Image (tube, rainbow, N blue to C red):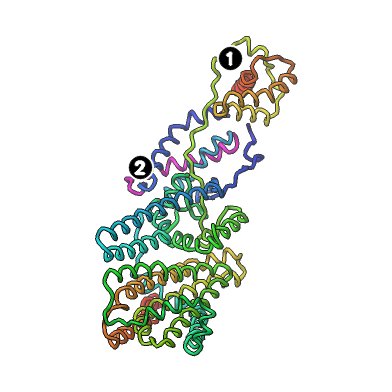
Amino acid sequence: MLERAHTAHPIDTTAEIETPEHLRFHYPIAGPARRGIAYLIDFLISGFVMALFGLAAFIGGIAVGDAIGEVSFGIVLLVKFLFDWLYFVLFEMVWNGRSPGKRALDLRVVTVHGHPLRLADSFLRNLLRAADMLPWGYVVGGVVAALDGRFRRLGDMVAGTMVIVEERRAVAASIRIEPPPTDKELRSIPQRLPLSGEELEAIDLFLRRKDKLGPAREEELASMVAPIFAKRMGVRYKDATRFLMLLHFRANTRRKAA
Amino acid sequence: MKTQDEIIAARQRDWHELEAIVSRGEAFHQLDGPSISRAATLYRSLCNDLAKSRARCTPDLVAYLDNLAGRAHSALYGAQPFRAPPIVSLLFREFPATLRKNAVFLAIASALFLIPCAIGFALGLHLPNTTADILPRSMLEGMADAYSKGFDAGRSEATDTSMAGYYVYNNVGIAFRCFATGIFYGLGSIFFLLYNGLVIGAVAGYVGAAGFGGNIGTFMCGHAPFELTAIVISGAAGLRMGYALVVTNGRTRLGSLRESAPEIARLVGGAAFMLLIAALVEGFWSPSAVAAPVKWTVASIFTLAVAAWLALGGRAGALQRRSA
């Protein structure tokens, strides 16, 4: 577990931000599927509201007569204009970089320096949708974003923004062995483990995540490595996961003692 | 050396505290002073934890800390209540000043718009049948028909509202597209300037040839100073954007583009404002039954006002800054 971050490169696309504290942290970049779904949600919301306005105008036209119908038609078009050009700007200002769709999918627009975006940024990035949308269905935007390391469409590039994933995460759970290891179990585990640092790391990671895996997958993964380790140490075990827990326990108690 | 579980046990309370503060999100700036400085302290020690954990903890924990650091960073450094931008100064000082700074692009955009407009007008006036082969005949005839009646009766107020909505939707869309497609090295803006110039000119010429030139002129004169100018300015902003991509002055293309972004935003913002005025005029004033001489007089005043605004706006401020 010692020289982890230097060797392991994140697989996900991330953007590194360096703060005035000379601290670097990483934002995960939002990919095409997530942004697509978020857009779809926004599209449906504005479509739904437009439909409501249209329906109200239609009913008004029937109930009161053509005069109201035409007034409503004008208002419907004004509303459509607002939705087409200002829906995103409005929400990105009020909700600090999030439209309803982005909020639903834990996305946020920030500047490439990791700061909240300002009005001019939002205005530019959303105006340029007109170019990103071409020729239909955001083909230009999608291709450009695919070529960019931070998945930015043209609007993001001009405005200097990017879309990041901002999921709430939980603190990694600590590893507890239930029931506590017995002396009998521990006697079978060698004092000095013939395991590399990376192997111990892998065990650690597996144990932290095993509760999310489901029993079958947990068993499958554990029985892929446990026999190899057991053979190396010349020991036998009954339960693969339990065996890995004991190895982890031994590794940690040894380090504490050292 | 501490194990990960020990680090978590020792620090978890602080992390949760910071998380609770940061989770208020958009309301962060409303916190009282002590809470904010407490958040800053917690954030700094979190930075410390993150640096350490990167060296010796599992990716799960690093990801959690990264995430929390990001949220705290954006809360602390970006915590400002949303303020409406200084609209008046933006519109009456910065916008005209930026426009004059980019006079070359404005001149090119004007030429790209006005020349095909003149050609289209001449075509429509003298060769209406040929014009009808180029542009959809139904559109041209529809326009001629629409302007055949004149405005003696005016339109109902309901129709006015309806048309104002249509103009906002349609014309602002035209102008914004004229700008946005400038991202393709300016080519989109060039195309839309030429195309819209040609169409607008041809329609006016065709309606003139059909004998209703006075009507369309009286109709258009009121909003044209705002609308046509705004379309040209949008095109100029698009050209400016394309130019930043082509002539980078030693920067990366993206860097050059980024540097021009504030100017571009100001130009398009100003144009959007003009289009809003244009739509109101076009919806309510242009089709009204007011006598033609009055309309032309008002149109002249509008034209002078726009010219004065764009030519003089921001000059006094610039002088003050220079002498200060």
Chain under label 1? A
- Dot 1 falls on a residue whose secondary structure is loop
Chain under label 2? B
Q: Which mark is residue A257?
A: none
Residue A39 placed where, x, y %? Answer: 48, 51
Depicted B57 relative to depicted A219: above or below: below
- Nearest the viewer among B273 and B62 is B273
Q: Residues within 10 Å of mark 1 (few under 14, many from 20)?
A: some
Q: Residue at x 41, y 73 (%)?
A: B95
Q: Which mark is residue A181?
A: 1
- Dot 2 falls on a residue whose secondary structure is helix
Q: Quadrant of the N terminus of chain B?
A: top right
Q: Quadrant of residue A207?
A: top right
- Nearest the viewer among A50 and B243 is A50
Asked if residue B38 lies in the magenta stretch, the reply is: yes
Q: Amino acid at mark 2?
A: Ser
Q: Does the residue at mark 1 contact the one at mark 2 (Cβ under 8 Å)?
A: no
Q: Is residue A242 left or right of residue B283?
A: right
The residue tagged 2 is B35
Asked if residue B308 lies in the magenta stretch, the reply is: no
Q: Residue at x 51, y 68 (%)?
A: B260
Q: Is residue A208 left or right of residue A81?
A: right
Instruction: Please state the extent of the stretch shown in magenta in the rendering.
Output: B29-57
Q: Residue at x 45, y 67 (%)?
A: B265
Q: Quadrant of the C terminus of chain B?
A: bottom left
Residue B52 visible in the picture: yes
Residue B239 visible in the picture: no
- Nearest the viewer among B160 and A55 is A55
Q: CA distance from mark 1 to mark 2?
A: 44 Å
Q: Amino acid at mark 1?
A: Pro
